[in-house]
Amino acid sequence: MQTDNNLIVEMKNITKSFFGNKANDNVSFSLKKGEIHALLGENGTGKTTLMNILTGVYEPDSGDIFYKGKKLRYSYPGEALELGIGMVHQRFSLIGSLSVWENIILGNPKNKLYLNTKKISQELEQYAKEYKFQVDLEAIVDKLPIGLKQKAEILKMLVRDVDVLIVDEPTTVLTKQETDNLLVNLKKIAESGKSVVFISHKMKVVRRIADRITVLRRGKLIGTVTPDEVTPEELSMMMVGKQSGALLERKAQLDQKKILSVEGLHVHSDKNLLAVDSLSFELNTGEILGIAGVSGNGQTELSEAIVGIRELRDGKIWFKDIVINKLSVKDKIAMGISYIPSDRIHVGVAGQRPTWENIGMKIYRYKKYSNVFGLNRKMMKEYADEIVKKYDIIQPGIEFPSLLLSGGNLQKVIIGREIEAESDLYICEYPTRGLDVGATEFVRNTILELRNSGKAIILISGDLDEIFMLADRIAVMHSGHFVSVFPNGKYDVTEIGLMMSGTLEHELQVNKGGKNV
Amino acid sequence: MYKVVLEQKERVSPNKELLFNIIAIIVALILSGIILAFYGYNPFTSFAGMFKSTLGSSFGFSETIVKTIPLIFTGLSVAMALNSKVWNVGAEGQLYIGALFAAWFAIYFPTLPKFLEIPMILLVSMIGGALWAFFPAILKMKFKMNEVISTLLLNYVAISVLDYFVYGPMKRDDNFPFSKDIPPEAVFNKIGFQNVHIGIFFALILVIIVYYVLKYTKFGYELRIIGSSIKAANYAGINYDKMMLFVFLISGAFAGLAGANQLCGIEFKLHSHISDDLGYTGIIVAWLARSNPFIIVAFAFFMSSLIIGSEALQYEGIPVAIGKVMQSLILFSILGSELFKNYRIKLKRG
């Protein structure tokens, strides 16, 4: 067994407050050489704050940090990285207008005045291959879907030779296969003698990968355990303090009507490449269509085309038996199409604006709230207060900018706003990504409730468990079209996983010897 | 070895921000004083002269107010565009075309009674300014052309257009490159304090309207969403292109009003130097005021007193260029003080 001499990082009795709230309350944490140490806890429990203190982003109010046996005090932000402590943040720190490779080499002291772009590209390709990270190095970051951005972000750290690698919620944007891939790679990194801190709220993943698990709850240290010491139930108790509830029942739908049909849809991506390629499907009221797929296979472009944010190249979309190709976003909202986008902070809300303005973003056109001359600010604020109460949104006050809200509460703002707008079609893109157990349960139940009340729902998710849990039908999307559409239950995780990487349905059946036919 | 380390401050109180601005101005005055002394002028008498010529005498004070009026218009013009993330650096050109339209209407159309003539002139100047803003707006909308380039270049075109008219069709009979005087019905009344004219009321009314519209209307709300995130605005069904076009036109119209104000309040005839960089100074005013309409008034006054003050230095025998240097130093100091406002500077042993 390893002794204390093996410790590379030791944080003792760390306390840090923001505006009087203790984000970390007397937390101690240690990291051994070559171990994968998971920091487990719900959103807003201070996991990220603790690691931000380790990397010098914040200064602790009290407590000591030791790194390689020496007491640590930072004098500038880049110092942690130079000392060998690198962190991949949950919110990306990439520069949107630069290409992937430019981002990766940015600020890396290894590169001198003259940039040998050819050599650098080759090196990066090498890294990308080694870790099986398929990223177009020449692509401009802004134009990449969120999943690929994250890959670039992780790759960026891998290229620096860090001794301590901190990854903050890395799996939230990855598919099952990609997650497996990442976990294998992180294990490899740890075996090479580096230490990994794995911040996550996903118990399952954490149990699979971690050598030790430290659980935080509401800023306090609950305990450090090894995965074998505790059962999943015990671990879950440590995390949330209570058992999580069950999902809502799924009602049988009697009176279903076709509400949306898409025929021969072609949509281009920002890069002007074909992102959605002759796609056709139909959707009924009271039905959840789960779209499974690796992010960046046209899901976002598909939803944006239906909502009207993105131009169609070809094809037709009927909604309530009317062709809506040419309608504006505003008209479509009025017809009853709601969208819960994956990019909450830039698309879902105007982050710098106060929460009441963001909650009012759909209803402000109603006569009750505005006329030609003015906006009824008082009524809009009252409405926002109502929503905050009804959806139990924890926030500093509706006058504060929405970007101060945690991920889960921000999602509640968006979901509350969309549900109260009483639409008939809901397009939910990665609705539970990055949310903690409580908020995830709430969102999933809300989606089921919408379905039971006869709304039509398109659920785009990278989390296959979620799709199995919620969808009536599942469509697997790969490079712009549906590989297959089938009722939920026909195929299992592995088969869907294969289809997500492009294997056709009939090939699957040949391989499986006709199982499930 | 010591290292200079910057630490971000969490919050800056408005009082402190004001204090920093004042310190910045004092630093700039000291630097300017050194330059003046270097050239053999007594800095103290020079500054006293500057002060006397702006705030120290009723004539100087009134002149400062007169110069403040167009700066409020151009400041509002730029600020309006900034609200929808559009950089209109073409207020200068829009002002010229606004003045051209106003002069054409005042001189060549049948003269109306004063209570009709002045509103008509204001309207016509707004149309002129909006027209000049329409070109860059449509170029941005249809061809995604960068508005900084297009509005800036159109400024030079506007000056040439104006020159064509004052040297050509509108030239006065005595062959000077001026237009004829505008009829008395078109002249802005004086309000009884030196040269200050009713333009000041038009400017202040516009400030209140802009404030109200931005804060209390659906349009203002939509602009705020756009200002925070264009993607969020599109998502909420706000047509960004349409809003951008509209805001561009309003921005141009405000600059056009500055043109009418110069024509009917001060110059009474059209000529090539009717603006004298008012459009560019408006960019600075809008930027310093963070696009807040009321604060625009304060900074318009500040910039105006700088301009008037440095012009007055000429009477002390000091070249006007030194006045311009002082203006720049003050601006640089205020911009530089941003660093001290937002960061704590520490020396650390490294």
Image (cartoon, coloured by chain):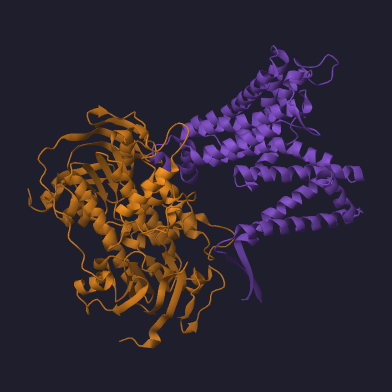
Q: Is residue A261 left or right of residue A193?
A: left
Where is residue A129? Give x, y as percent: 36, 59
Res. B182 image quadrant: top right
Between B150 and A236, the one nearer to me in the picture = A236
Q: A240 or B164, which lies in front?
A: A240
Residue B81 vs A193, above or below: the answer is: above
Q: Quadrant of residue B5?
A: bottom right
Locate residue B173 relative to residue B317 in the image: left or right.
left
Compared across the picture, whether A510 is left or right of B47 comes to left
The image shows residue A413, relative to residue A67, as above or below, that is above
Where residue A97 appears, x then y in whole percent? 49, 49
* Residue B96 visible, this angle: yes
**Quarter location, residue A211:** bottom left
Residue A106 image point, x, y percent = 51, 59
Q: Position of residue B303 (x, y in %)?
A: 73, 44
Q: Which chain is orange?
A: A
Residue A348 visible here: no
Name above or below for residue A166 compared with residue A175: below
The N terminus of chain A - image quarter: bottom left
Chain (purple) = B
Q: Residue at x 67, y 42 (%)?
A: B297
Q: Nearer the viewer, residue B277 or A118?
A: B277
In the rendered picture of this protein, how many numbered marks are placed on residues? 0
Q: Is residue A113 left or right of residue A237?
A: right
The residue positioned 78% from the left and 27% from the top of the image is B267
**Looking at the image, which residue is at 23% across and 43% down?**
A457
Q: Residue reaching furthest top?
A: B110
**Where A146 falls versus B227 (above or below)?**
below
